[in-house]
Image (tube, helix red, strand yellow):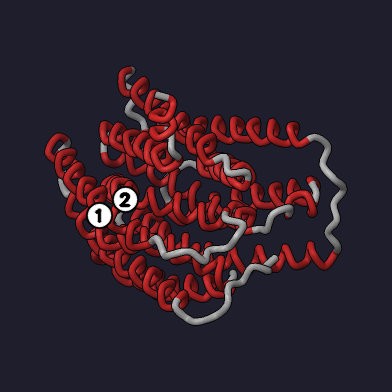
Amino acid sequence: MPQLLRRLAAPEHLYLAALGLTGLAAVTSVTLPAAERGELAANMVSATLGAAIGGLSLDTFLLSRPAGWVFSRGRTWVLAILGISVLLSGVAAALLTAVAGVGSHLVGVGSAAGLTVFNTVSSIALRQKSFRLVYAIRAASGAVLVGGYVALYAAGRLDGGLWSLTWFGVQWLSALVVCGLVLGMVRRFGSAPAPTATGSDYRADALAVGNLHVGIFAQMMTLRFNQILVARFVGAGALGVYALAVAALEFAQAGAVVRAQRILADRDGADGPDPTKAVVKAALPVALAAVVGLAVLGFLQPEYRHAWVLGLLLLPGSLATAAGKSWSALLLKRRGEKATTVVALFTVAVAIPAYFGIIPWAGVVGAAIASSLAYAVHAFASRASLRRAQPPNHGTV
């Protein structure tokens, strides 16, 4: 029996459970009128994109550092870069909320800060291979969110702003819990040794963060900025339907996210076989099931009857994203930050003009088509860069 429980609690299963509960929260939010759900979606995308832009990609940066990096830099340095990233995340979320023209600055800014804390501190736990604990916290926070939404629905409070505040509270709850987890880990280590890094090491860190973040910033703009433009040019109601389709198709990427984090956390490099084919095979049935689920929801809630069409248009891009996450993680480990940055900048140079050119006149259908195109460009550019014969880069700092 313990072995069975251990298998059920495998990191991949816990991450899928977390994603499933997040998806259940998205399904529950379908009880909102489309315009109210659009307000909720606008707050969520402003916060998540704000955290991605202002968070300086510290979660990925910390995961990719060699063993002993945290102790060599010292607690003050780690806390300083976390504080800066929280501040920048709030500023980015405020700007995105203004561009979208929909949503609350309070929710966007506050949630972006909470997400940045959770993502950054979680990466420290993941460095210690605490995948189960981190993903269990994510799953538990998803369950709390679903419970909050159900309670609001039962009380007849179908207000997108109120549901957004509930989402905001859950982000900070999960952030505080993971902070407690990491503080417990620090105490078990005992007193930390004195930092051994030199000034040149800290400058190298800043340069590496910049090189890495430029690429991930470009990647996240490719993934999320289309929703900001849908809110701006098409309106909250259309965003409510489109964001539902996007959330449904993200189920297919669960295995790829876990695999990418494992690749980054592997201190011995990434010289093993490429896992991408298996990741895409696992993603396909989940993506198809998501489209079917959207069709069922559309039958039950006529306001969302076109969501399955958007899901079908997003399906190729979802599979490309699943592949791209693995290839991008391998590329980062083997060739360093510069290679992933070049790929991401190339992709965003295709994506942003496509979004601005298509979304204002083709609406959510154009957003789905342009997104799938952009995701495919990123995946195949990552693969092409990965195939270049260069020795693995283990010494990046």
**Amino acid at dot 1:** Leu
Image quarter in which the C terminus is found: bottom right
35 is higher (above) or lower (below) than 314: above
| 222 with respect to 153 (left or right) | right
Image quarter in which the N terminus is found: top left
At horizontal 80% and vertical 49% (from top left) the residue drawn is 74
Are discs 2 and 1 less than 8 Å apart at CB?
A: yes
Task: Please tell me how many numbered marks the rendered image carries.
Answer: 2
Residue 54 in the image: state x and y as whole percent.
60, 55
Residue 293 appears in the figure = yes
| 296 with respect to 109 (left or right) | left
Residue 284 is tagged as 1
Q: Residue furthest left?
A: 299
Secondary structure type for disc 1: helix
Q: Residues within 10 Å of mark 1 (few under 14, many from 20)?
A: some
Depth check: 236 or 269 in front?
269
**Residue 357, picture quadrant:** bottom left
Q: Residues within 10 Å of mark 2 (few under 14, many from 20)?
A: many
At horizontal 35% and vertical 34% (from top left) the residue drawn is 25
Secondary structure type for disc 2: helix
Residue 41 is tagged as none
Give the labeled residue for mark 2.
252
Residue 351 in the image: state x and y as whole percent.
39, 70
330 is higher (above) or lower (below) than 248: below
Q: Residue furthest bottom?
A: 389
| 295 with respect to 63 (left or right) | left
